[in-house]
Image (cartoon, rainbow, N blue to C red):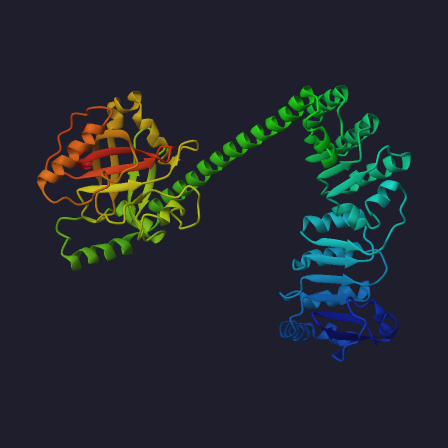
Amino acid sequence: MKKILLLIKKNYLFFSYKEDHEKNIELLINTNVISDNELVFSEDYIKSNPKIVSLFINELCESHNITKISIEKNDLAMLILDLFNKNNYIKSLYLLEEKNLPFTLCDKIIKQKKFNYLNCYTIPGYLIEILDKNNIEVISRNEMLFSSKFMEENNLNQFSKIFYKISLRLSLPLLPTDQDDFFTFCKINKYLRTIHLSGINMKDLEFIVKTLKENKVSRINIMIHDNITNSDIINYLRKENKKAKKHKIYFKLVYSEEFLEKNIINQTLVTILRVCGLIIGSIVIMVIGYIALNNYQSLQEVSQIQDNLTQIIENVDNTKIVDELNKELEDSGKEENIVVNDYLASLLTVNKDTVGWLKVPNTNIDYPVVQGIDNEHYLDYNFYNEEDRNGWIFMDYRNENVELDQNTILYGHNRYSSGVMFGPLIDCIYKKWYTNPENQYIEFNTIYGTYKWKIFAIYKVDVTTDYLRTTFESNEDWQQFISLLKGRSVYDFKVDIGPNDKIITLSTCTGNRTKRMVVHAVWHGNIEENKNE
């Protein structure tokens, strides 16, 4: 009957057959000392009582902060790994037997779904790829003899190093053995991103590119370390670079610091212009690409939030929320002239700061509105209170959100390029937009009512706070304020505003931090009252 020895040492457990322990103890990882913490189980006991042994091992892992296991034999591993099915502590596995990793053991390791690191003697190529797809890093200990200058220069003496290699160095010219090993490397490796060449050799460069294409290796930067001044070679590289780009293979010239220092003044104008052209072109493309991607992501992210909120409004049972709001109104004595907006009340389950929903016609402005404890928070956080460069549309913290003030102020970032938040507000300054009668009415509904607002002023203004007032001392003060706003407007909307009217103000920057884009609209009644207007 086989006896199985369990040693506890630092942060790992070591398993071996008892009779083989003394002669193989030197294989222990990171130590040459045998711990006094020794336990012995019979193989039959483990097979008969796996739950008891598993619970015991879990206790050991927790009490000793154990994250690694080391197993002496592959066949022993097939038994021992079953004891870790419900163990959440172990992340690394060391297999000490100097044999090839068998498929059955590899399959068991993958099904455990707990390991992120495997150290074994040697492993077939197809198995390391399977493990890699399951996010398990593999290190093989068996060292290979260097068969070429290429292999030696890059220290590719283990199969796992070939598989995971990110960056290569190639000394030119390549010998036939170098070419053979490079071809084999490309068939095995899955992570290569950069190749550093010691110089320029057109024949070798063509071979390298051809090999990469044949093995479908892409997204590779070939860094050519050579002080090239010959215009014919530069033209050749430019032509070949255009061809290689189709396969996502890119050439880059790397001049030595000494060369740059000596030739910064004497280098020919043609070379400077061409190299600079390549660099500037690459930067421009990258910047444009980054901006385009950033804008696209912003639009997608905001659209996804809008869709999610629409689904919540349509599907969430808001009966309890509405009852709570009505109770609050009753307690405050406001229930007689204010009715809860059932449509928007469900959004309070997502964000308690919700105060309404704003929609500006023929723009992308169609968002719920929130109100924070200041005018800073929602510049950097979205409706879900997650950090977001787009921010969100929010009401001035000074405003009353139940019975609206005479001037209710809404803010939002100008994300014009992506078309989100108050970016589209910039279009309101154009005659084609503001003279269209359909565009002159804004919907701003609150938790406590559905309202329609008619635009009476649109303008750009230097940064000021004179249009951001929320309270007024008298009717005369109010009328002077309205006259100020109308006087700035790019168009006379011929809208009369009385002492008892209420307005909303939409404010954003213009892309120029010294100016603001502003739209004002006056309350034109409830939505239901204006449907047939």
- Displayed quadrant of residue 153: top right
Q: Position of residue 147 (x, y in %)?
A: 90, 44
Q: With respect to residue 145, does 170 lie above or below?
A: above
Q: Is residue 84 above or below residue 110?
A: below
In the image, is residue 230 above or below residue 15? above
Give residue 121's position: percent from left, percent from top.
Answer: 83, 57
Q: Residue 48: image x %, image y %? A: 72, 74
Q: Is residue 39 visible?
A: yes
Residue found at x 89% / y 34% = 175
| Numbered disc total | 0
Determine whether, in the image, residue 78 is placed left or right of residue 88.
right
Q: Quadrant of the C terminus?
A: top left
**Can residue 363 be spotted in the picture?**
no
Residue at 24% x, 41% y: name it: 468
495 over 167 or under it: above or below: above
Q: Foreground residue, 214 or 389? A: 389
The residue depicted at 68 percent of the width and 31 percent of the height is 248
Report whether 462 appears left or right of 403. right
Left or right of residue 227, residue 57 in this image: left
Looking at the rendered image, the quarter that the N terminus falls into is bottom right
Work out which residue is located at the far bottom of the displayed protein and give it: 36
Relative to the observer, which residue lies in front, 74 or 21? 21
